[in-house]
Image: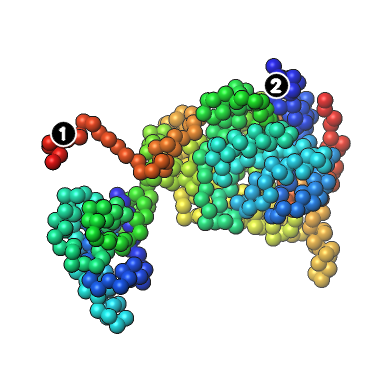
Amino acid sequence: MIVGEQKPLAEIMDLLGQAQKVLVAGCGTCVTVCFAGGEKEVGILASAMRMKSKLDGHSLEVDEITVQRQCEWEYIDPLKERLGEYDVVLSLACGIGVQAMNERFPETIAVPGLNTTFLGLPEEQGIWEERCQACGDCVLGLTAGICPIARCSKQLLNGPCGGSQDNVCEVDPDIPCAWQLIWDRAMALGRLDELLEIQPPKNWERSRDGGPRKIVREDLLLAEEEAE
Amino acid sequence: MMTEERTNGYKSGSTLEKVLATGHFAVTGELGPPQGADPEEVIHKAKLLTGIVDGVNITDNQTAVARMSSIASGVLAMREGLEPVVQMTCRDRNRIAIQADLLGAYALGMRNLLCLTGDHQSFGNHPTSKNVHDLDSVQLIRMVKDMRDDGVFQCGDAIKAGKPCFFIGAAANPFGDPFDFRPYRLAKKIAAGVDFIQTQLIYDIPRFREYMKRVVDMGLHEKVYIMAGVGPLKSVGMTRYMRDKVPGMIVRDEYVDRMSAAADGIPEDDKKARRDARRQEGIKICIEQIQELREIEGVAGVHIMAVEWEAAVKPIVEGAGLLPRPEVE
């Protein structure tokens, strides 16, 4: 899932500028699961904003709403009617949700209340860690199911650098060495041969290259009249 | 073939390649470029090494600290009669920039190249910089080999005006983990096309011996020249620091003890004498190590890393009985 964390309140208040009336908009999907931007967090943040503005000597009007998914038109379209009343929408969705709001409602300014941090999973209650960098050319089938692009500090494809020691990365003892993990798992599964293949230079064309990446599925496109 | 004439049947025709190919025990050193533009810094260090080593590694922004470029420093060192081993890391350049720099390096007379992953930028003086790692060291080796042997760029296009024919080196760390992976990783570098290897600093000879045994059992020593990495210890603090703090290094306690005992009997207040005694001990240890490493099957030479202590190289090489260096044609 997409993992995010809330920006500091002071930064959020700065982003709101001179706004008098704000809608705090949560998202019911990824950021709800990671306790950063769901209905509950919307409520807590809205209260904090009201208190802060009162302490600062002006009373900001703050309303709350949470939609199922801010990244899909069908879930945000129903907001259209009420957005006119607000000076700013503070979106607690990931960066995709914030942009969806701005894109769908050109008259509205939506600002981010979260930092979208990574694609990852909750390792345990309260701890999330990155697992995927959406590089567009998945290597997990070659690396015993452990991603060196997301988890190796140098994104190496052919084995560990010289800095791997006692299972950890040279960069920080809190970072497990991805190649130690890959090695251990490959050995446990009897798949050493895979690691001995020289992996050629990666095709980064499918990663950060040439504007936003795009997928077009001809088989799913609606005919023009259907799309209307 | 133009290249074969130029390299006289050798891959690169470098002195280092010839020394190794003719069965001599090779010696390389290391020169760290300055954090500035003054050529005298390089020239001064180069003078300390001329005639002492067969080649000298010129580091590429080592420990991710911005410095004079390896290739430019290499040209300065070459003018002093040294043969540079240009270091090239994958941290700061993508495949386009690396190939461009290598063409330039060859045009300027560089013949040896060491292909490295590169220290992570978080260790250097620009920890907020973005790293590249478009290639890893194995992929870099293959790219340089293809440029030399097939005359093609990494994309497959033909090199149009002169192939860069480098003697291709790489690093190996017998002390990194997973230990069992290390000989296989060396095998991958060989399969990618590496000609010589310089190891990480060795302060654990038994573990290095075990590593070399596996390397020899796999027959790898017959496919690549392996140069054992050594460096003179300078002080007790430095020895402890390397033992306790440097990732991927193993330092046996005996070295800490010896460095510590080196100043025994010298009055505490005679700091200079104590320091000199420790430095002498560091050089002595290094000489003993070279003699011991030389006896290990598969070791073709020694790479002496005397960072910011270039003056120590001559007494080490001399003490190990490795002077004068062979003349090769």
Q: Which residue is mark 2?
A: B3
Report x, y in % for residue B240. Answer: 66, 57
In this view, the residue in front, A223 or B142, is A223
Q: Chain of mark 1?
A: A
Note whether residue B185 is visible. Answer: no
Report x, y in % for residue B101. Answer: 63, 38
Rendered position, B112 above or below A20: above
Helix, strand or loop at label 1? It is: loop
Q: Which residue is mark 1?
A: A223
Q: Residue at x 75, y 41 (%)?
A: B75
Note whether residue B134 is visible. Answer: yes
Report x, y in % for residue B97. Answer: 58, 39
Callout 2 amino acid: Thr
Furthest-right residue in view?
B324
The mark total stands at 2
Q: Residue at x 60, y 25 (%)?
A: B159
Furthest-top residue in view?
B1
- Residue A71: give its label: none
